[in-house]
Amino acid sequence: MQPSSESTASTESISIGNIRSAGGLDSNAGRPSDKHNFTLLLKKLRETLDAQGKSDGKHYLLTIAAGAGAAYPDKAELSEIHKYLDYAAIMTYDLHGTWDRYTDLHAPLYDNSDPSPQYKSSVDSAVKTWKKSDFPMDKLVLGIPFYGYLYSSVNGSNQGLYQTFSGANAIGYDRIKKDYLGQRGFQRHFHPQSKVPWLFNGTVFITYEDTESIRAKTDYIKAGGLGGAMVWELSRDQDAELLNALNDGLK
């Protein structure tokens, strides 16, 4: 189920970032043609890589890191670009974060039925958007975060979930495990529908991934016939606890 780097000869890869129809310098102009031009760019890259691979006996992987938002199909021809890609790694994290007005779950696997003062988003809804846009699931690689978000001065209602806060920052899993799990009155909660955990001690709320949530996501990957998983990022899991859970879950 994991993306393979094997071929009849040897394999190398090239990945280009998430190209959107807006962004960059203020002087950059977005044009309606950007969407199709992205497809043409990938086509040209594929042709060039295949030509080089033919001459040196290699297959060069062409991949992209792509958005998980519902608007992404408006910016890329998903039904076309898969012809030129080996994989698309969908960035299914930062679905909520420090930019929100309320605490929320970082990378919920599924939508939930909770009343919430803000928008809903989930890994599953992102995958369904790509599937509806005719992108083959066996080329879609699910993004999994090895970090979370810590919110401070959080209202104590609802175990800290969907509450106002005064400050927030990103935090790696290593630090969560070392400084917060089982310490300072922090209690772990696990959402039964969204399949992700959070910590709360009455004032500090931390949304993150652990081995249980990763196992739910690897089950999802296998059940949906997805191409595998990618992570952001390895340095946040020095003991490889999450990485091993991911590897074991995909076997």
Image (spheres, rainbow, N blue to C red):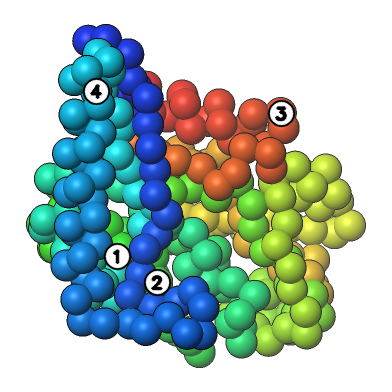
**Residue 106, horizontal then vertical, whole percent:** 55, 63
For residue 35, above or below residue 183: below
Between 83 and 207, the one nearer to me in the picture: 83
Which kind of residue does numbered mark 3 sit on? Asp
Q: What element carries label 4?
A: helix
Residues under numbered marks 1 and 2 in contact, where contact means CB atoms less than 8 Å apart = yes
Which quadrant does the C terminus fall into? top left
First of labels 3, 4 by sequence position: 4
Identify the residue position indicated by label 1 in the image: 125
Q: Is mark 1 on a helix, strand or loop?
A: helix
The quarter of the picture where residue 40 lies is: bottom left
Neighbours of disc 2 within 10 Å: few (<14), some (14-19), many (20+) = many
Identify the residue position indicated by label 4 in the image: 53
Which kind of residue does numbered mark 2 sit on? Ser
Neighbours of disc 3 within 10 Å: few (<14), some (14-19), many (20+) = few
For residue 160, above or below residue 200: below
Q: Using the image, tell me which numbered label, if any, was put on residue 239.
A: 3
Neighbours of disc 4 within 10 Å: few (<14), some (14-19), many (20+) = some
Between circles 1 and 4, the one closer to the viewer is: 4
Between 125 and 36, the one nearer to me in the picture: 36
Between circles 3 and 4, the one closer to the viewer is: 4
Which kind of residue does numbered mark 4 sit on? Gly
Q: Is mark 2 on a helix, strand or loop?
A: loop
Identify the residue position indicated by label 2 in the image: 121
